[in-house]
Structures are given as C-alpha cells and as structure tokens.
Image: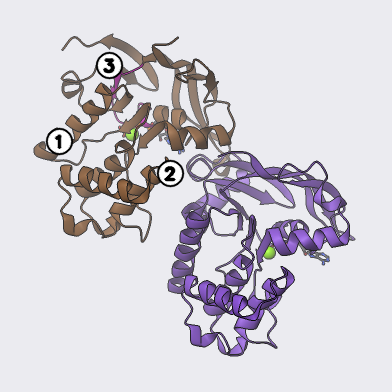
Amino acid sequence: MKEPILKVEGLTKIYDSTIAVNSISFALYQGEILGIVGESGSGKSTLLGCLYFDITPTSGKAYLNKENRSIFELNSQEKRKLRNFNMGMVYQTPHLGLNFDITSGGNVAEKLLMANWRNYSDIRKRLTTLFERMELSLDRMDVPLSTLSGGMQQRIQIAKALANNPEVLFLDEPTSGLDLSVQARLLDLIKKIQQELKISTILVSHDLKVVRLLAERVLVMKEGRIVEAGLTDQILEDPQHPYTQLLVNSIL
Amino acid sequence: MKDIILEVKNLSKRFTLHLLGEKMVPGFHKVSFTLKRGEFLGVTGKSGSGKSSLIKCIYRTYLPTEGEIIYYYKNGNSVDLATCSDKEIVDLRRERIGYVSQFFYTIPRISCLEIVSQALIQQGIDKNKAERKAKSMLSRFLIPENLFGAYPSTFSGGEKQRVNIAQAITRKIDLLLIDEPLASLDKKTKDIVLKEILKLKKRGTSVIGIFHDEKELRSFADRILVMENGKGIKIYENHN
Ligand SMILES: Nc1ncnc2c1ncn2[C@@H]1O[C@H](COP(=O)(O)OP(=O)(O)OP(=O)(O)O)[C@@H](O)[C@H]1O
Ligand SMILES: Nc1ncnc2c1ncn2[C@@H]1O[C@H](COP(=O)(O)OP(=O)(O)OP(=O)(O)O)[C@@H](O)[C@H]1O
Ligand SMILES: [Mg+2]
Ligand SMILES: [Mg+2]
C-alpha cells in the first residue's frame, strides 16, 4: 500500500446528550478496503456522514490526499466539489441515498450532473456502462425506482456512487436488509469492482463475515470510539479487546 | 546481517480470554532462533505445544505478547514484525511473506484458479501470465483441470490443502510460513508438494515449516526446532 489517501484525526461528533463519534483517528490507504465493525449506535454512520459532509463534526480534522488543509475547513463550494468529484457514498438504506420520485437512471444521472456532465449522449453512455457493470438490465433504467427490488435499489446506489469515478468510496452496510443470496451476489460484485478500479474504500458493516470477505484491515468501534484496530485475520483469530472477543464469539 | 532474514528473540504468546473471567491460556514462551536466507527450519512437537501459534505470531495473525521478530529486508533495513504497523505487515504479506494455514479457510464463491492467480496479480503480474502460472502449478499439484473453475469449498481435504499451498508458493516470496502442509496428503501428492517447496528454497526463499513427524523432517530440513509445552526445548542442525 502506498500513501494514505485519507487521514482522520480526532474526529468528534456530539449531539445534545450523546457523543456519537468520540475522537477517532485512522488512515485509509490508497486502493485498500478498510472495514469498520461495531454494534448498533456505535457511531459508524455518523463517522461516514461527517466525511461525506452530510454531518458537521463537532471537532477533528481529515486530510484528503496530501492537502495540508483539513476538508472540514474548506468553504461550502469546495466541499461540494470534493463530494461531487472525489467521493461516492452508499447509504445504509436506499431511501437515504436515492430519490424515489425519479427513475433509477435519473438517480445515477443526478450524480453525473453534479460532477458537471452536460452532454446527454455521454451521460446515457455512462449510465449504460454503469448498469452493465452492476449487472442491472438496461430496461430498468427508465422505470421508477420504487418498481425495483431492494437488491436492485442498492445496486443503483452503488452505480450512483461510482458514477463520477470517485477516489474514495464510503459503503454503509451496503448489503443489510437483503436476503442472503442477494447479499452474496452484491458482495461479490463490490469485490470485483473494487479490485478492478482500486478505489480506496471504507466499508461499514456490523457483520464480521462481510468484512472478512472484503477488507484486509478492520477498525472495531464501540460507543463512538475505536476499541481495536488490526488486520482482519488478527481481529478474528486473536481479538484483544473484551468487546471484540464478544463480537467474534457471536459469529454464527 | 546479509545472510539472515529473521531473528526471533524471546518471543512469547499468551491469550487472555476476557469472556471467561480473564482466563489466561499460554501459547508458547520465550522462543528464540535465527533463520538464514534460503534455510529450511522445521518445527515439530506435540499437539498443543505452540507450533501454530509461533508462526501465526510471525505472520501477525496473532499479536505477540512479548519479544521481537526482526525481519531483514534484502537491502539491509529491518523491521520488528511484533510491533510494526499493520500497513507494513500488509505490504510484507503482499510482496514477501507467504503463509499456509493448517486449516484452509475457503473464501466463498472464488474459484481455485482465481485464488492462486490473485496472489500473483497482487504482485503486479498481468492477468494472463498469472493465470498461466496458476494453471501450471495447479496441474503440477494434480488438481484436475475440470476443477480449476470450481469453488474449493466443495473440494476434498487433500485438494483444498494443495490449493492452499499453491496459493502461497506460486508467487515469488522471501519467507514462507507453512503449517502441516503434508497433513492430509497421500504419498504421491506429498512428494510433489515437498518437491515444489524445496524448489522455492533453492531459489532463496527461507522456510519455516511445521511437521508433526520429526523423522520425516530429517529428510529435508536444514535445522529442526522441537517444541514442548510452549517452549523450544531444542534446536539442532540436521545433517541428513
Ligand atoms: N441526528 C441525531 N441526533 C441525535 N442523536 C443522533 C443523531 N444521529 C445519530 N445519533 C446518535 O448517535 C449514535 C451513533 O449513531 P450512528 O447512526 O452513527 O450509529 P451506527 O453505528 O451507524 O448504528 P447502526 O449500526 O444501527 O446503523 C447513536 O446513539 C444515535 O442515536
Ligand atoms: N486463538 C487462540 N485463542 C486461545 N488459545 C489459543 C488460540 N490459539 C491457540 N491457543 C492455545 O495455545 C496453545 C498452543 O496451540 P497451537 O495451536 O499453537 O498448538 P500446535 O502445536 O499447533 O498444536 P497442533 O499440533 O495440535 O496443531 C493451545 O493450548 C491452544 O489451545
Ligand atoms: Mg448506521
Ligand atoms: Mg497447529
């Protein structure tokens, strides 16, 4: 692995009474998939939300590439540019990431428009490529999103996230809520695409089996903090923290 | 230090089981040895004596409790595998250190050809060449060609084992950690696998191999480390 592409330092998000993310630091290296596991409410989505500018952190810094200014110090136009050109996000549920009032293709095109794609036929071509890559049949492009299955909707989210060729991809439980066979296919697809495109990826999942399949390194979160970080096989075979031991022992 | 690749000093591993009232389980205690470039160190000893734990610590699947594992790069730089960053370990695993586990974790829905070729692709070899090399190794290991595209989860124990070994040794590496590679093989495939491992050694790869049969080890290891109750009770040169 070469340089870190993203360095997070002391990231904190406090809501009135909860510290959702508590002083988190880590690095994401170029081309790797970094897994984040942890129980419900441990702050995983909040962490991704901060990095994708959906949520304003209370404090902390994050550096993309070798910029010496934290991404949180950028003005709103610069932030929008980073988000539209350099980042992709797949939210925990399709409803968070997609607009159900427009077609499935329209959702993906939206991301392209935000990344300044203007030419209609270029956009159409890109949509076709993305749909094919996501193994979505092309006749689903112009139908309302609500007519697609949950698994297809998640694939639309991934197509949207990949549309702008992002440098950094955030995946928040990309397979939750899907039945097992659909989960498996989607995970294989994510793995294939990540290997081909070598996009630096943060994968959030509460499921250690999912993380084992895709990530070489893992962070374990509990109550807003990283309690353990390590190579995936080490976390699974020699977990150090009591919480990680509980997590590993709970694998079905 | 040009001729030494690994220096293990007073290495210990203890497990703390937090869910069982902080129960401590000893893995192994204060093991020391050095490994030369191109040397084959055989490790043997009774079940539970800490053999697997020892090589898992070197590979960072287990975190050592105390001690050092100094790894020497060819350019003379060194790094302590007991304490260096995960990133450094990831790089070493991709480029220089191979590991064959005692029990093979089969990744679901990945064909055996992909398992072997991916390790090569990771080292920067192009896809076609990687597949060619992978196929040739699998054939040498007597994996029938009609199984190349199949998932190892359905393979026999011996076939799984050979895929596991092929995955680790088809690429060029400097250090091979290998845990009971011959365990579920018959005489014929045993000889083939052993021949390939020794070929790798001839090309300069150092090997730490666990074999429960000390007599067998004497026919090919350069030195033998005998473990008992978590201690390296003796280490001796093997003059065949
Ligand atoms: N907008 C908000 N206002 C107040 N509290 C919030 C808000 N968003 C999240 N929280 C709280 O912050 C904590 C972390 O939430 P977060 O959604 O990041 O958890 P998570 O790890 O993603 O959980 P899950 O696995 O269930 O998705 C929770 O206690 C949550 O209730
Ligand atoms: N992940 C682990 N967690 C807890 N204890 C462990 C773990 N791995 C090994 N041990 C313990 O460490 C000791 C040494 O085990 P190890 O697997 O290293 O033995 P071994 O010499 O390889 O045995 P075998 O020949 O049966 O494979 C044993 O008591 C074992 O129970
Ligand atoms: Mg969440
Ligand atoms: Mg063992």
- How far apart are the two marked residues, 2 and 1, measured between alpha carbons? 26 Å
Q: Which mark is residue B122?
A: 2
Q: Position of residue B215 (x, y in %)?
A: 16, 21
The residue shown at (38%, 43%) is B125
Q: Chain of mark 2?
A: B
**Region in magenta:** B37-52
Type of residue at label 2?
A: Gln
Q: In the rendered view, would you say B151 is above or below B173?
A: below
The residue shown at (52%, 33%) is B89
Type of residue at label 1?
A: Ile
The reply to whether dot 3 and dot 2 touch (C-beta < 8 Å) is no
- How far apart are the two marked residues, 1 and 3, measured between alpha carbons? 22 Å
Q: Position of residue B71 (x, y in %)?
A: 48, 20
Q: Is residue A49 visible?
A: no
Residue holding disc 3: B224
Instruction: Name chain B's colour.
Output: brown
Residue B40, magenta (yes or no): yes
Callout in the foreground (2, 1): 2
Q: Are marks 1 and 3 on the same chain?
A: yes
Numbered disc 1: secondary structure? helix
Q: Which chain is purple?
A: A
User: What's the image's color scheme?
Assistant: by chain
Q: Which mark is residue B192?
A: 1
Which of the pair B161/A161 is nearer the observer?
A161
Callout in the foreground (3, 2): 2
- How far apart are the two marked residues, 3 and 2, measured between alpha carbons? 33 Å
Give the image quadrant in which the ligand numbered 2 is located. top left
Left or right for B201, reference B230: left
Q: Mark 1 vs mark 3: which is more N-terminal?
A: 1
